[in-house]
Image (spheres, rainbow, N blue to C red):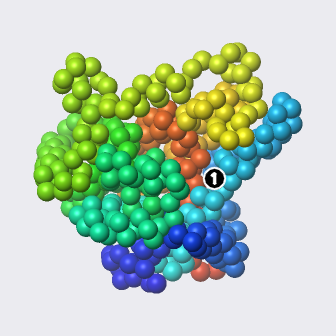
Amino acid sequence: MVRCKGKINIPYLILFALLQFPLKLAGIKFMAYIYIYLIPFFYLLYHINWTVYFFSRIKNKYSKVSCAIFCYLIFISILWPLLTGTFDFTYITIYWRGVFFILLKYVFLLAVYEMHVNKEAPSAEEYCNYYIYSVILYIGFTILILVLPWLRESMMHVLYLEPSDIKNLEKASYKTRFGWGGWSGYGATMQCTLALAFACANSILSAGNVKKQTKYLILSGILMIGNSFYGRTGLAISVVCMLLTVLFAVSRKRIKYIVRIIFMAITMIIVLLLMRKYVSAIEAWFHWVFSILSNYKKLGHFYDSDGSVETILTRMHWMPDLETLLVGDGFYTDGIYYYMHTDSGIMRPILYYGVIHYIASLMAYFIIAYQLCKRLASERMLIFQQKYVRYIFFMFFIMTMLFEIKGESICTLIGMIFPITFITQKKIGIVGTENDKRDNEFVQ
Protein backbone atom coordinates (compact mmCIF):
# COMPACT_ATOMS: atom_id res chain seq x y z
CA MET A 1 0.00 0.00 0.00
CA VAL A 2 3.06 2.26 -0.14
CA ARG A 3 2.62 5.32 -2.36
CA CYS A 4 5.12 7.46 -4.21
CA LYS A 5 6.20 10.61 -2.46
CA GLY A 6 3.66 13.40 -2.83
CA LYS A 7 1.03 11.09 -4.34
CA ILE A 8 -2.30 10.05 -2.86
CA ASN A 9 -2.52 6.40 -1.86
CA ILE A 10 -5.80 5.42 -3.55
CA PRO A 11 -6.40 2.08 -1.72
CA TYR A 12 -5.89 3.82 1.64
CA LEU A 13 -8.17 6.69 0.61
CA ILE A 14 -10.92 4.22 -0.30
CA LEU A 15 -10.42 2.39 3.00
CA PHE A 16 -10.60 5.72 4.85
CA ALA A 17 -13.79 6.70 3.03
CA LEU A 18 -15.49 3.35 3.64
CA LEU A 19 -14.71 3.52 7.36
CA GLN A 20 -15.83 7.15 7.53
CA PHE A 21 -19.09 6.39 5.76
CA PRO A 22 -19.79 2.65 6.18
CA LEU A 23 -21.43 0.77 3.33
CA LYS A 24 -24.32 -1.25 4.83
CA LEU A 25 -26.02 -3.57 2.36
CA ALA A 26 -29.62 -4.71 2.81
CA GLY A 27 -29.85 -8.24 4.18
CA ILE A 28 -26.20 -8.42 5.26
CA LYS A 29 -25.92 -5.38 7.51
CA PHE A 30 -23.78 -7.38 9.94
CA MET A 31 -20.99 -7.56 7.35
CA ALA A 32 -20.45 -3.81 7.73
CA TYR A 33 -19.78 -4.19 11.45
CA ILE A 34 -17.19 -6.88 10.70
CA TYR A 35 -15.06 -4.61 8.51
CA ILE A 36 -15.77 -1.43 10.52
CA TYR A 37 -15.01 -2.78 13.99
CA LEU A 38 -13.99 -6.44 14.13
CA ILE A 39 -11.18 -6.33 11.55
CA PRO A 40 -9.68 -3.11 13.01
CA PHE A 41 -9.82 -4.66 16.49
CA PHE A 42 -7.94 -7.80 15.47
CA TYR A 43 -5.53 -5.77 13.35
CA LEU A 44 -4.54 -3.65 16.34
CA LEU A 45 -4.37 -6.78 18.47
CA TYR A 46 -2.09 -8.45 15.92
CA HIS A 47 0.12 -5.34 15.84
CA ILE A 48 0.09 -5.06 19.60
CA ASN A 49 3.57 -3.50 19.72
CA TRP A 50 2.39 -0.56 17.61
CA THR A 51 -0.81 -0.25 19.64
CA VAL A 52 1.08 -0.13 22.93
CA TYR A 53 3.57 2.32 21.46
CA PHE A 54 0.76 4.57 20.22
CA PHE A 55 -0.71 4.96 23.70
CA SER A 56 2.77 5.36 25.20
CA ARG A 57 3.10 8.60 23.19
CA ILE A 58 0.71 10.30 25.58
CA LYS A 59 3.44 11.82 27.70
CA ASN A 60 2.52 15.51 27.86
CA LYS A 61 1.17 16.24 31.36
CA TYR A 62 -1.91 18.02 30.02
CA SER A 63 -2.75 15.11 27.74
CA LYS A 64 -2.37 12.76 30.69
CA VAL A 65 -4.77 14.94 32.67
CA SER A 66 -7.26 14.79 29.80
CA CYS A 67 -7.08 10.99 29.62
CA ALA A 68 -7.42 10.76 33.41
CA ILE A 69 -10.58 12.91 33.28
CA PHE A 70 -12.10 10.71 30.57
CA CYS A 71 -11.28 7.58 32.61
CA TYR A 72 -12.91 9.17 35.67
CA LEU A 73 -16.02 10.08 33.63
CA ILE A 74 -16.35 6.50 32.38
CA PHE A 75 -16.08 5.23 35.96
CA ILE A 76 -18.59 7.74 37.30
CA SER A 77 -20.95 6.97 34.40
CA ILE A 78 -21.09 3.36 35.61
CA LEU A 79 -21.48 4.40 39.23
CA TRP A 80 -24.09 7.14 38.71
CA PRO A 81 -27.16 4.93 38.01
CA LEU A 82 -26.37 3.02 41.21
CA LEU A 83 -25.99 6.19 43.29
CA THR A 84 -29.20 7.73 41.92
CA GLY A 85 -31.13 4.46 41.96
CA THR A 86 -32.23 4.75 38.31
CA PHE A 87 -30.21 1.73 37.09
CA ASP A 88 -30.13 3.32 33.64
CA PHE A 89 -26.82 2.18 32.15
CA THR A 90 -27.57 3.39 28.63
CA TYR A 91 -25.00 6.20 28.97
CA ILE A 92 -22.41 3.41 28.97
CA THR A 93 -24.05 1.19 26.35
CA ILE A 94 -24.82 4.05 23.95
CA TYR A 95 -22.56 7.06 24.63
CA TRP A 96 -19.28 5.51 25.78
CA ARG A 97 -19.66 2.50 23.51
CA GLY A 98 -19.93 4.96 20.62
CA VAL A 99 -16.77 6.76 21.74
CA PHE A 100 -14.88 3.45 21.90
CA PHE A 101 -15.97 2.32 18.43
CA ILE A 102 -15.13 5.67 16.81
CA LEU A 103 -11.72 5.72 18.53
CA LEU A 104 -11.12 2.13 17.38
CA LYS A 105 -11.76 3.07 13.74
CA TYR A 106 -9.48 6.07 13.70
CA VAL A 107 -6.63 4.46 15.65
CA PHE A 108 -6.80 1.62 13.12
CA LEU A 109 -6.65 4.10 10.22
CA LEU A 110 -3.65 5.78 11.82
CA ALA A 111 -1.93 2.40 12.29
CA VAL A 112 -2.39 1.56 8.60
CA TYR A 113 -1.15 5.03 7.66
CA GLU A 114 1.99 4.83 9.80
CA MET A 115 2.90 1.24 8.98
CA HIS A 116 1.93 0.97 5.31
CA VAL A 117 1.25 4.36 3.74
CA ASN A 118 4.00 6.66 5.00
CA LYS A 119 6.60 4.90 7.11
CA GLU A 120 9.36 7.43 6.55
CA ALA A 121 7.74 10.71 7.50
CA PRO A 122 4.17 10.49 8.82
CA SER A 123 2.60 13.89 9.29
CA ALA A 124 -0.59 15.24 10.82
CA GLU A 125 -1.15 17.43 7.76
CA GLU A 126 -1.05 14.51 5.34
CA TYR A 127 -3.30 12.39 7.57
CA CYS A 128 -5.77 15.30 7.79
CA ASN A 129 -5.67 15.50 4.00
CA TYR A 130 -6.81 11.88 3.75
CA TYR A 131 -9.65 12.78 6.08
CA ILE A 132 -10.57 15.75 3.86
CA TYR A 133 -10.30 13.77 0.60
CA SER A 134 -12.45 10.93 1.95
CA VAL A 135 -15.22 13.41 2.80
CA ILE A 136 -14.93 15.02 -0.64
CA LEU A 137 -15.17 11.56 -2.21
CA TYR A 138 -18.47 11.08 -0.39
CA ILE A 139 -19.72 14.50 -1.52
CA GLY A 140 -18.79 13.59 -5.09
CA PHE A 141 -20.85 10.41 -4.87
CA THR A 142 -23.83 12.39 -3.57
CA ILE A 143 -23.55 14.73 -6.57
CA LEU A 144 -23.32 11.72 -8.88
CA ILE A 145 -26.58 10.18 -7.65
CA LEU A 146 -28.28 13.57 -7.89
CA VAL A 147 -27.28 13.79 -11.55
CA LEU A 148 -28.21 10.12 -12.17
CA PRO A 149 -31.63 9.46 -10.56
CA TRP A 150 -31.61 5.81 -11.66
CA LEU A 151 -28.45 5.24 -9.62
CA ARG A 152 -30.12 6.78 -6.58
CA GLU A 153 -33.12 4.45 -6.99
CA SER A 154 -30.81 1.44 -7.28
CA MET A 155 -28.87 2.46 -4.17
CA MET A 156 -32.13 2.90 -2.25
CA HIS A 157 -32.91 -0.79 -2.88
CA VAL A 158 -29.38 -2.09 -2.32
CA LEU A 159 -28.48 -0.27 0.91
CA TYR A 160 -29.79 -1.03 4.37
CA LEU A 161 -32.11 1.80 5.42
CA GLU A 162 -34.23 2.25 8.51
CA PRO A 163 -37.96 2.88 7.86
CA SER A 164 -37.48 6.43 9.17
CA ASP A 165 -34.59 6.93 6.71
CA ILE A 166 -36.74 5.86 3.77
CA LYS A 167 -39.52 8.20 4.91
CA ASN A 168 -37.10 11.13 5.19
CA LEU A 169 -35.45 10.43 1.84
CA GLU A 170 -38.84 10.60 0.14
CA LYS A 171 -39.06 14.30 1.10
CA ALA A 172 -38.07 16.61 -1.75
CA SER A 173 -36.04 18.86 0.56
CA TYR A 174 -33.96 15.87 1.74
CA LYS A 175 -32.98 14.60 -1.73
CA THR A 176 -29.33 15.46 -1.12
CA ARG A 177 -29.05 13.68 2.25
CA PHE A 178 -27.97 10.42 0.70
CA GLY A 179 -24.75 8.62 -0.19
CA TRP A 180 -23.28 5.13 -0.15
CA GLY A 181 -23.57 5.33 3.64
CA GLY A 182 -27.35 5.65 3.34
CA TRP A 183 -29.11 8.45 5.21
CA SER A 184 -26.64 11.31 5.68
CA GLY A 185 -27.68 13.87 8.26
CA TYR A 186 -26.13 15.26 11.42
CA GLY A 187 -23.17 12.86 11.42
CA ALA A 188 -22.29 13.61 7.79
CA THR A 189 -22.51 17.37 8.25
CA MET A 190 -20.29 17.12 11.35
CA GLN A 191 -17.66 15.19 9.38
CA CYS A 192 -17.83 17.77 6.58
CA THR A 193 -17.38 20.59 9.07
CA LEU A 194 -14.41 18.96 10.79
CA ALA A 195 -12.82 18.42 7.37
CA LEU A 196 -13.40 22.10 6.58
CA ALA A 197 -11.86 23.10 9.93
CA PHE A 198 -8.77 21.03 9.01
CA ALA A 199 -8.66 22.74 5.60
CA CYS A 200 -8.99 26.22 7.15
CA ALA A 201 -6.32 25.43 9.75
CA ASN A 202 -3.89 24.10 7.13
CA SER A 203 -4.62 27.13 4.95
CA ILE A 204 -3.78 29.50 7.81
CA LEU A 205 -0.63 27.54 8.65
CA SER A 206 0.56 27.47 5.02
CA ALA A 207 1.78 31.05 5.34
CA GLY A 208 3.81 32.11 2.32
CA ASN A 209 2.88 29.03 0.29
CA VAL A 210 0.33 30.35 -2.23
CA LYS A 211 -0.14 26.97 -3.92
CA LYS A 212 -1.00 25.22 -0.67
CA GLN A 213 -3.25 28.00 0.56
CA THR A 214 -5.16 27.99 -2.71
CA LYS A 215 -5.52 24.21 -2.61
CA TYR A 216 -7.01 24.29 0.89
CA LEU A 217 -9.36 27.14 -0.04
CA ILE A 218 -10.66 25.14 -3.01
CA LEU A 219 -11.15 22.12 -0.75
CA SER A 220 -12.99 24.37 1.74
CA GLY A 221 -15.37 25.49 -1.02
CA ILE A 222 -16.18 21.88 -1.98
CA LEU A 223 -16.74 21.00 1.68
CA MET A 224 -19.09 23.98 2.08
CA ILE A 225 -21.19 22.63 -0.79
CA GLY A 226 -21.20 19.22 0.89
CA ASN A 227 -22.37 20.75 4.13
CA SER A 228 -25.27 22.39 2.33
CA PHE A 229 -26.27 18.87 1.19
CA TYR A 230 -26.31 17.22 4.60
CA GLY A 231 -27.49 19.86 7.05
CA ARG A 232 -27.88 23.56 7.72
CA THR A 233 -26.17 23.28 11.10
CA GLY A 234 -22.86 22.23 9.57
CA LEU A 235 -23.25 24.79 6.79
CA ALA A 236 -23.78 27.62 9.31
CA ILE A 237 -20.79 26.47 11.39
CA SER A 238 -18.67 26.18 8.25
CA VAL A 239 -19.54 29.79 7.40
CA VAL A 240 -18.40 30.78 10.90
CA CYS A 241 -15.10 28.90 10.39
CA MET A 242 -14.55 30.69 7.08
CA LEU A 243 -15.34 34.07 8.66
CA LEU A 244 -12.79 33.37 11.40
CA THR A 245 -10.25 32.50 8.70
CA VAL A 246 -11.00 35.83 6.99
CA LEU A 247 -10.61 37.67 10.31
CA PHE A 248 -7.22 36.04 10.82
CA ALA A 249 -6.19 37.10 7.32
CA VAL A 250 -7.37 40.66 8.02
CA SER A 251 -5.47 40.75 11.32
CA ARG A 252 -2.32 39.67 9.45
CA LYS A 253 -3.04 42.11 6.57
CA ARG A 254 -2.95 39.36 3.95
CA ILE A 255 -4.88 41.13 1.21
CA LYS A 256 -4.15 38.57 -1.54
CA TYR A 257 -5.29 35.76 0.75
CA ILE A 258 -8.57 37.59 1.45
CA VAL A 259 -9.12 38.11 -2.29
CA ARG A 260 -8.67 34.36 -2.88
CA ILE A 261 -11.22 33.58 -0.16
CA ILE A 262 -13.73 35.99 -1.70
CA PHE A 263 -13.14 34.48 -5.15
CA MET A 264 -13.69 30.97 -3.69
CA ALA A 265 -16.95 32.10 -2.06
CA ILE A 266 -18.25 33.62 -5.32
CA THR A 267 -17.30 30.46 -7.22
CA MET A 268 -19.15 28.31 -4.70
CA ILE A 269 -22.30 30.43 -5.03
CA ILE A 270 -22.14 30.19 -8.84
CA VAL A 271 -21.78 26.39 -8.63
CA LEU A 272 -24.84 26.13 -6.35
CA LEU A 273 -26.89 28.34 -8.68
CA LEU A 274 -25.86 26.25 -11.69
CA MET A 275 -26.79 23.06 -9.86
CA ARG A 276 -30.17 24.54 -9.03
CA LYS A 277 -30.70 25.42 -12.70
CA TYR A 278 -29.64 22.11 -14.27
CA VAL A 279 -30.58 19.56 -11.57
CA SER A 280 -34.31 19.94 -11.05
CA ALA A 281 -34.39 17.38 -8.24
CA ILE A 282 -32.71 19.82 -5.84
CA GLU A 283 -35.11 22.77 -6.23
CA ALA A 284 -36.94 21.96 -2.96
CA TRP A 285 -33.60 21.33 -1.23
CA PHE A 286 -32.31 24.74 -2.35
CA HIS A 287 -35.31 26.51 -0.78
CA TRP A 288 -34.90 24.41 2.40
CA VAL A 289 -31.20 25.24 2.79
CA PHE A 290 -31.62 28.97 2.27
CA SER A 291 -35.07 29.35 3.88
CA ILE A 292 -33.65 31.44 6.74
CA LEU A 293 -32.31 34.05 4.31
CA SER A 294 -35.40 34.06 2.10
CA ASN A 295 -37.71 34.39 5.12
CA TYR A 296 -35.65 37.29 6.41
CA LYS A 297 -36.04 39.00 3.05
CA LYS A 298 -39.82 38.39 3.00
CA LEU A 299 -40.79 38.64 6.68
CA GLY A 300 -38.02 40.77 8.15
CA HIS A 301 -36.77 38.16 10.63
CA PHE A 302 -34.73 34.96 10.57
CA TYR A 303 -36.99 31.88 10.49
CA ASP A 304 -36.32 28.57 8.77
CA SER A 305 -38.92 26.67 6.77
CA ASP A 306 -39.54 23.88 9.28
CA GLY A 307 -38.96 25.75 12.55
CA SER A 308 -35.94 23.65 13.53
CA VAL A 309 -34.00 26.66 14.86
CA GLU A 310 -36.89 27.58 17.15
CA THR A 311 -37.16 23.95 18.27
CA ILE A 312 -33.47 23.83 19.19
CA LEU A 313 -33.58 27.08 21.15
CA THR A 314 -36.92 26.64 22.94
CA ARG A 315 -37.71 22.92 23.23
CA MET A 316 -34.25 21.32 23.39
CA HIS A 317 -32.80 23.73 25.97
CA TRP A 318 -34.14 24.85 29.32
CA MET A 319 -32.87 25.62 32.80
CA PRO A 320 -33.24 22.50 35.00
CA ASP A 321 -33.92 22.82 38.72
CA LEU A 322 -30.83 23.26 40.92
CA GLU A 323 -30.55 19.61 41.98
CA THR A 324 -30.76 18.33 38.39
CA LEU A 325 -28.29 20.99 37.26
CA LEU A 326 -25.72 19.94 39.85
CA VAL A 327 -26.05 16.14 39.96
CA GLY A 328 -28.43 15.23 37.13
CA ASP A 329 -31.35 12.79 37.26
CA GLY A 330 -29.35 9.66 36.43
CA PHE A 331 -31.26 9.09 33.18
CA TYR A 332 -29.87 9.10 29.63
CA THR A 333 -32.88 7.43 28.00
CA ASP A 334 -36.39 6.62 29.17
CA GLY A 335 -36.21 3.14 27.73
CA ILE A 336 -37.26 4.16 24.21
CA TYR A 337 -36.32 7.79 23.61
CA TYR A 338 -33.60 10.06 24.96
CA TYR A 339 -34.48 11.41 28.39
CA MET A 340 -36.74 14.49 28.21
CA HIS A 341 -36.69 14.13 24.40
CA THR A 342 -33.75 16.50 23.96
CA ASP A 343 -31.15 16.24 21.20
CA SER A 344 -28.83 18.83 22.74
CA GLY A 345 -25.29 17.72 23.46
CA ILE A 346 -25.31 20.15 26.39
CA MET A 347 -28.55 18.98 28.00
CA ARG A 348 -28.15 15.19 27.74
CA PRO A 349 -25.02 14.84 29.94
CA ILE A 350 -26.29 17.49 32.37
CA LEU A 351 -29.54 15.59 32.80
CA TYR A 352 -27.55 12.41 33.32
CA TYR A 353 -24.81 13.39 35.79
CA GLY A 354 -24.84 17.16 36.22
CA VAL A 355 -23.15 20.24 34.86
CA ILE A 356 -19.87 19.71 36.76
CA HIS A 357 -19.21 16.43 34.96
CA TYR A 358 -20.22 17.97 31.65
CA ILE A 359 -17.74 20.82 32.14
CA ALA A 360 -15.10 18.21 33.01
CA SER A 361 -15.75 16.44 29.68
CA LEU A 362 -15.39 19.76 27.85
CA MET A 363 -12.08 20.42 29.58
CA ALA A 364 -10.75 16.97 28.69
CA TYR A 365 -11.80 17.35 25.06
CA PHE A 366 -10.42 20.86 24.62
CA ILE A 367 -7.06 19.87 26.12
CA ILE A 368 -6.70 17.30 23.33
CA ALA A 369 -7.98 19.80 20.74
CA TYR A 370 -5.35 22.33 21.86
CA GLN A 371 -2.62 19.67 21.61
CA LEU A 372 -3.82 18.94 18.07
CA CYS A 373 -3.54 22.62 17.13
CA LYS A 374 0.01 22.70 18.55
CA ARG A 375 0.86 19.58 16.57
CA LEU A 376 -0.36 21.06 13.28
CA ALA A 377 1.60 24.26 13.95
CA SER A 378 4.76 22.40 14.98
CA GLU A 379 5.01 20.68 11.59
CA ARG A 380 5.35 24.12 9.97
CA MET A 381 7.87 25.24 12.60
CA LEU A 382 5.24 27.69 13.88
CA ILE A 383 4.94 26.16 17.36
CA PHE A 384 6.46 29.23 18.99
CA GLN A 385 4.08 31.61 17.22
CA GLN A 386 1.24 31.13 19.66
CA LYS A 387 -1.13 33.34 17.68
CA TYR A 388 -1.48 30.58 15.08
CA VAL A 389 -2.21 27.95 17.71
CA ARG A 390 -4.67 30.17 19.61
CA TYR A 391 -6.55 31.21 16.50
CA ILE A 392 -6.99 27.65 15.23
CA PHE A 393 -7.96 26.46 18.70
CA PHE A 394 -10.55 29.24 18.93
CA MET A 395 -12.03 27.99 15.65
CA PHE A 396 -12.23 24.43 17.00
CA PHE A 397 -13.78 25.75 20.23
CA ILE A 398 -16.53 27.68 18.41
CA MET A 399 -17.20 24.77 16.06
CA THR A 400 -17.56 22.28 18.92
CA MET A 401 -19.82 24.43 21.09
CA LEU A 402 -22.14 25.26 18.17
CA PHE A 403 -22.44 21.56 17.41
CA GLU A 404 -23.11 20.81 21.07
CA ILE A 405 -26.13 23.14 20.95
CA LYS A 406 -27.60 21.04 18.13
CA GLY A 407 -26.60 17.55 19.29
CA GLU A 408 -23.90 15.44 20.92
CA SER A 409 -20.57 16.05 19.19
CA ILE A 410 -17.75 15.58 21.68
CA CYS A 411 -18.28 11.81 21.71
CA THR A 412 -17.67 11.78 17.95
CA LEU A 413 -15.02 14.49 17.60
CA ILE A 414 -12.73 13.17 20.35
CA GLY A 415 -12.44 9.82 18.59
CA MET A 416 -11.56 11.56 15.34
CA ILE A 417 -8.96 14.04 16.59
CA PHE A 418 -7.31 11.95 19.33
CA PRO A 419 -5.20 9.73 17.01
CA ILE A 420 -4.00 12.69 14.90
CA THR A 421 -2.76 14.48 18.01
CA PHE A 422 -0.35 11.66 18.81
CA ILE A 423 0.79 10.73 15.32
CA THR A 424 4.46 9.76 15.26
CA GLN A 425 7.05 11.81 13.42
CA LYS A 426 9.57 9.10 12.80
CA LYS A 427 9.90 6.02 10.68
CA ILE A 428 8.24 3.00 12.29
CA GLY A 429 11.01 0.58 12.94
CA ILE A 430 11.92 -0.83 16.33
CA VAL A 431 8.87 0.13 18.31
CA GLY A 432 9.35 2.11 21.47
CA THR A 433 13.05 2.94 21.22
CA GLU A 434 14.43 5.89 23.12
CA ASN A 435 15.08 7.77 19.86
CA ASP A 436 11.45 7.38 18.82
CA LYS A 437 10.24 8.63 22.18
CA ARG A 438 12.65 11.55 22.23
CA ASP A 439 11.54 12.72 18.76
CA ASN A 440 7.93 12.95 19.88
CA GLU A 441 8.37 14.74 23.18
CA PHE A 442 8.04 18.27 21.87
CA VAL A 443 4.47 17.82 20.63
CA GLN A 444 3.03 15.32 23.10
Q: Identify which amino acid the numbered label 1 is placed on.
A: Val
Q: In this view, does 232 lie above or below 424?
A: above
Q: In which quarter of the image is residue 74?
A: top right
Q: Is residue 290 left or right of residue 133?
A: left
Q: Is disc 1 placed on a helix, strand or loop?
A: helix
Does the rendering let one see residue 238? Answer: no
Closer-to-camera residue (386/287):
287
Closer-to-camera residue (275/157):
157
Report the residue at 22% width, 20% height from top: 299
Residue 212 at what x, y percent from top left? 25, 60
Report the residue at 35% width, 75% height from top: 8
Residue 344 at what x, y percent from top left? 55, 33
Q: Which residue lies furthest to the top in this view?
A: 322
Q: In this view, does 222 lie above or below 86?
A: below
Closer-to-camera residue (438/411):
411
Report the residue at 46% width, 24% height from top: 313
| Mark 1 burial class by Cα count in 10 Å: few <14, some 14-19, many 20+ | some
Q: In which quarter of the image is the C terminus?
A: bottom right
How many numbered markers are drawn?
Answer: 1
Residue 12 at what x, y percent from top left? 45, 76
Report the residue at 47% width, 53% height from top: 165
